[in-house]
Amino acid sequence: MSKSMYGKKIKPFRYVILSVVMLLLFLWQSTPRLLPEILGVTPIFMLPLLASVGVMAGEYASGLFGFFIGLLMDVYVTPSICFNLIAMTVIGILCGLLARALKFKSFFSALVLCVISSVIYYLAYWLVYRVILSGDTAYYLLSYSLPALIYTTLTIIPIFFIVKLILNNKG
Amino acid sequence: MKQFFTSRVFKFLVSAVAVLVAITVALGFIGYKISPQSNLIGMVITPVQVVITKASSSVERFLLAVARTEQLEEENNRLREQLSSARSDLIDLDKYKSQNEFYGQFLQIKEEHPDFLFSPATVVSADAAATYDSFVIDSGSSAGIALHDPVITAEGLVGYISEVGDTFSTVTTILSPSLSVGSMDSRTRETGVLSGDSVLLKDKMCRLSYLSRSSTVAIGDYIITSGSGNVFPQGLIIGTIDHIDKDDSSITISASIKPIIDFSEISQVMVITQFSGQGGLK
């Protein structure tokens, strides 16, 4: 059994439940017209999920979750260049390491990690898919990535507490 | 922290990512456009996504039927019981009616283009980070779909197949800056190149470039595919000219095109798996 950031051991079946929740959130974010659009963008639930897992379960769990989340997200991206696999694995590891190094344990810590993760992800996505592959300018970054980042960060409010409930962290 | 970088988990993650990236890159060089891991996961995930998408549409139709029924109940109390029992029938009728309308419109296209072979598909998901650039449909190579097959609705051109799995495919739309379509004005027959544009993407429009400065295109003109490159058949409606941009420093002019299709409402498409003269990108 792995240890949470609070020193308590997390039972494996809780990770199984978290995996099911992760899958449901992924299906929800990918289904067209199931999420309300704000300024033409929808959020990515996986980023606040990784931040929350990083805070509550550490770098091993968040790294592994990031790996599998990346595999899932790459299914629906074109061209298929393993972007999400690399990005989400790195973000997962980073969230866990930062949370442990800075002793992040609270909701606000997860919020900070979520903002950091979202900035990294949306910047990297813009660089790879918009600048390198499409010859784009900063317009997309300001008009789409920024609202998407804010929208994604707001979703940490329910997601953090769902993850906390599942992992039964009483820190 | 150092302990993590020497742990088995970290070594597994690094080696797994490296292997998968290497496989994807290697297959990319020999012509495969979709990674094997994405293909495998997609085969499992896509049927689930189809169920969720259809359930979501059913709930939407049910709520509309309820709202309509409630309006009638307020207007006439006497018919309330009859309307309640007819509610479930109405949902089924709406579904069959929309299906009939969908296929009926494609019958007209088939009569105009007897060389077209179609494969119907449903939009099941989209990349959460992309903005109408691409989406996934529930048909793949097992349904006869191949890379770069054009994708249309009864109204007009949607885009083309950019990745093919066994049971699902990714469609890149005309709003994507990575897709260029040989196009022409249906009235003046002047040709240009249509592609997505980040600035116009917010308004769900695209740009028609490389029109000559002496061009006589006008706002409201219909833009259709020219058939050049043999990727898209000639004559598919793309949209209408919304605005003409004349840059004095350029030898060409461009126009903003409003697609005929509302990409935020798209749910069912047809993939043209074969047409006369098909070739182009392979």
Image (tube, coloured by chain):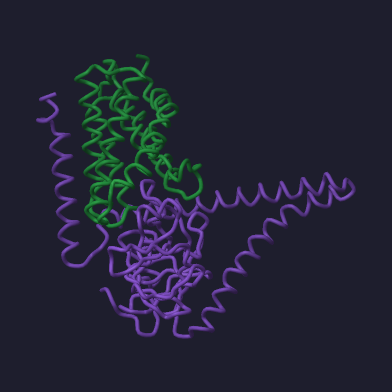
Q: Residue furthest front?
A: B248
Q: From the viewer's perspective, is residue B238 above or below residue A78?
A: below
Q: From the viewer's perspective, is residue A48 above or below residue B232?
A: above
Residue at 67% x, 50% y is B64
Quadrant including the N terminus of chain B: top left
Residue B180 point in image, percent of width and height: 32, 67
Residue B243 point in image, percent of width and height: 45, 62
The green one among the chains is: A
Q: From the viewer's perspective, is residue A159 above or below residue B25?
A: above
Residue B228 in view here: yes
Residue B259 point in image, percent of width and height: 47, 63
Residue A9 point in image, percent of width and height: 29, 20
> Color used for chain B?
purple
Residue at 38% x, 31% y is A153
Asked whether B186 or B43 is in front, the reply is B186
Q: From the viewer's perspective, is residue B136 above or below residue A50?
A: below
Q: Is residue B163 left or right of residue A151?
A: left
Residue at 21% x, 37% y is A90
